[in-house]
Image (cartoon, grey):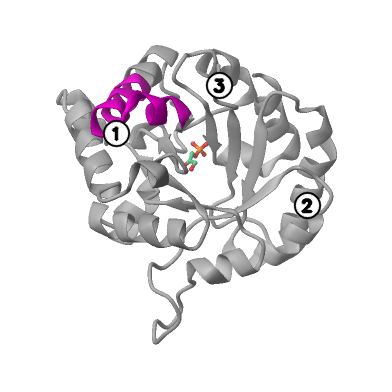
Amino acid sequence: MMRRPLIAGNWKMNTNRAEAVALAEGVAKGSGEIKNADLLVCPPAIYLESVGKALTGSSVALGAQNMYAKGNGAFTGETSAAMLSDVGAEFVILGHSERRALMGETDAVVNEKTLAALAAGLTPIVCVGELLEEREAGKTGEVIATQFAGSLAGLSAEQLGKIVIAYEPVWAIGTGKVASPEQAEEVHADLRRLLTESYNGEIADKVRILYGGSVKPSNAAELMSQPNVDGALVGGASLKAEDFLGIAAAI
Ligand code: 13P
């Protein structure tokens, strides 16, 4: 497989500074043992710089959980892509379901952010995923296709080749109810087909598609063995270095 797996930790709004640094040090320390995957941690924005320092000398990459699409200006409380890059972030999670649900982020907003992140040299991890009622109504494919088209509108093939996609079924996030490997693979294969149809096979083969939602060391191997699952976006289990590294070691 030409795609190198990526195991990304989304710490969400957790840790204080000391805990964030200790967690990053733990991940950095164990990262030498991980041969088959790239590692990424995404702490709260306020701790990016401290965590970046704790990761110095390791191969663990640093990412943010959100950004604003505009450059400098009168946008009180917001953080730009250039600011994230300035403190060492290389990745940014965009359109996470919690932001879509709680902060009202639409596909259009996610699209604007994706383009701005790319323009600033950040790698966007663009999240898509269906609600339980959408899955039960047989609408998963339709929902994913709409989010894909809306969130990634206007990207050139070159830009598309630089992004990461995360499939996170909303019903699997923080619930302990992981998607079965078959359920994940079905959507991932669908996303790969959308990439091929909208762009071309060469680009589609390059893009990493991560699965997120209740990933743990005990279920990671089976999920990661699916042909179109190229890594994981991990929430709860990324808050313990041992569990996060255990997921990466399962590949
Ligand atoms: P959990 O791993 O806690 O289910 O969270 C998944 C997630 O939302 C990662 O972005």
Q: Which label sits in the foreground, 1 or 2?
A: 1
Marks 3 and 1 sit apart, C-alpha to C-alpha, by 18 Å
Residue drawn at x 45%, y 32% is 207
Residue placed under numbered mark 2 in the picture: 55
Residue 34 sits in quarter: top right
Q: Amino acid at mark 2?
A: Leu
Q: Amino acid at mark 3?
A: Met
Marks 1 and 2 sit apart, C-alpha to C-alpha, by 36 Å
Assign a secondary structure to mark 3: loop
Assign a secondary structure to mark 1: loop
Q: Where does the image place residue 21, in percent across and percent down from the top left?
A: 77, 57
Residue 123, compared with residue 48, is above or below; it is above
Magenta segment boundaries in residue numbering: 187-206
Residue 18, compared with residue 83, is above or below; it is above
Q: Dot 3 surroundings within 10 Å: few (below 14), some, or many (20 or more)?
A: few
Is residue 145 toward the left or the right of residue 55 in the image?
left
Is residue 75 toward the left or the right of residue 48 in the image?
left
Is residue 184 toward the left or the right of residue 30 in the image?
left
Q: Dot 1 surroundings within 10 Å: few (below 14), some, or many (20 or more)?
A: some
Assign a secondary structure to mark 2: helix
Q: Quadrant of the N terminus?
A: top right
Is 6 or 245 nearer to us in this picture?
6
Residue placed under numbered mark 1 in the picture: 199
Q: Where does the image place residue 5, in percent across and percent down from the top left?
A: 59, 27
Residue placed under numbered mark 3 in the picture: 2
Is residue 231 toward the left or the right of residue 99 in the image?
right
Q: Amino acid at mark 1?
A: Tyr
Residue drawn at x 69%, y 32% is 243
Q: Main secondary structure of the magenta part?
A: helix
Residue drawn at x 51%, y 18% is 223
Residue drawn at x 60%, y 27% is 4
